Every structure is written in C-alpha cells, then in structure tokens.
Amino acid sequence: MERPPVCLVTGNEHKVREAAMTLGRYGIRVERCPMRKLEVQSDDLVEIARTAAESLCGRGPDAPLLVEDAGLFVRRLRGFPGPYSDFAYRTIGVEGILRLLDGVEDRAAYFMAALCACWRGELACFSGVVEGTIALEPRGTGGFGFDPIFVPDGHTATFAELGEDVKSAISHRARALAAFAEWFLSKEL
Ligand code: ITT
C-alpha cells in the first residue's frame, strides 16, 4: 500500500518546497494543508509546534499532519530573535539583525526547527538544529527570511546563495524532517 502524502500546515510556500525536496529523498510526498494553526506565545519552539499540532489532531485528512515552527538564535544576542523570529523579521528585518551585530566579532548563530506530527491519534515531535554564523551583509536571492545572512558551518556561502537543493539537505528543517521520516517509515500501514 502506498503511503499517503504528508500534510504540512503552513502559510509559507518555501517551507513546503523545502519539505518536498527533503522528504522526496525518502520517497515521501508533501502537500500544503489549507488549515489555520494556533500560534501560542512561548520561549520554547517545541511547545509552540506541539500545541498547534494537538489542536489540529484528527481534524485533517487521513494522513500525517505536520506543524513546524522555526527560528534564528543569535548567541551574542542571548538567543534573540529565537521564538520571536517572525515578529523580528517583520519589524527590524535582516538589516536590523545586522545593525544589532555591528562591530561584533562573535557572530555565531543557529537555526532551530521544531516539527510535530499527528497521525492515527499519535503525536510525535522532532527537532533539528544547524549551526553557523551571521554574514556581514545580506548575500544571495534564494530561500526566505534570514537566509541571506546565515552561513552554515562548513560553507562560505549563505543559505540564500546555496539554494534550496543544498539547504534542503543540511538545514535545521531538513534534520527535523529526516527524524520524522525515520519515524513515519517505521510505522506499518
Ligand atoms: P508558518 O506559517 O509555518 O508559521 P512562518 O514563515 O511564519 O511560517 P515560522 O513561524 O516557523 O515560519 O518562522 C518564523 C520566522 O523565522 C520566519 O518568518 C523567518 O523569518 C524565520 N525563519 C524560519 N525558518 C527559516 C529558514 O529556514 N530560513 C530563513 N529564515 C527562517
């Protein structure tokens, strides 16, 4: 029996494309789920994703429902913007983060993704982290959000320069999705 496509609840088309590329490597198909997700305020990305997934469990199609919450954590800014990345992106933006790091040598940062899946009454959460540094200026046109200023460790190019093919293999989202794929594929149909 063929596995049903997983249903990603998000308003962000980039996330759907990245997830389709990552999960495609495991033979898992992805569709965007036209549902609204609950967005609670918390310092914990897993709690945010878990609460949203719980509230949708059993309401979607007979397929795994996925909710993902992600953020950029800048070490020198004590983890800011972290769970407030969406607000920070819409207000101060990429340029605002660069200004906060003006003259700062330690530019270490990481992206984290928390992914919660609900399927056949079971809820499971996975997370993924990618370490890197904040570039001195925005570079590249691919991706979304803070991709033009994030350089993953082991690379000199930003996520926006590396493009979706590379990002979908090494990113925080890719790591969380890989853990989900192992879980999903271990389940009998
Ligand atoms: P949802 O509908 O899935 O919530 P979103 O775009 O609001 O989509 P998040 O709340 O998970 O996504 O992420 C908050 C912000 O963090 C997002 O607006 C981006 O600015 C940033 N972000 C998250 N993941 C990112 C990534 O892979 N690359 C660059 N920026 C990212």
Image: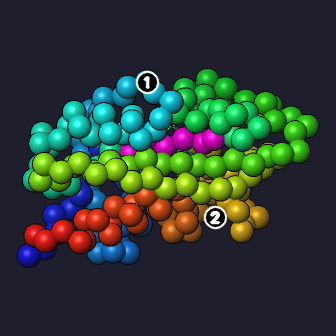
Spot the residue most to the right: 103
Classify residue 138 as left or right of residue 69: right
Task: Let me know if residue 69 is in the magenta part.
Answer: yes
Quadrant where the image shows the N terminus: bottom left
Residue toward you, 187 or 58: 187
In the image, residue 158 above or below residue 29: above
Residue pictured at 62% horizontal, 32% vertical: 81
Closer to us: mark 2 or mark 1?
Answer: 1
Q: Which comes sooner in the sequence, label 2 or label 1?
A: 1
The response on whether ligand 1 sits within 8 Å of label 2 is: no
Q: Residue 134 placed where, x, y %?
A: 75, 47
**Rendered image: mark on residue 184:** none
**Extent of the magenta region:** 68-73
Q: Residue at x 70, y 55 (%)?
A: 132
Residue under the point 38% across and 25% down = 40
Q: Which mark is residue 41?
A: 1
How far is mark 2 from mark 1, CA to CA? 32 Å
Q: Amino acid at mark 1?
A: Gln
Say which residue appears at 32% left-offset and 39% top-offset.
Answer: 50
Front one among 4 and 31:
4
SS class of the residue under badge 1? Answer: loop
Residue 93 occupies quadrant: top right
Q: Could you tell me which secondary element the residue under label 2 belongs to?
A: helix
- Numbered mark located on residue 162 in the image: 2
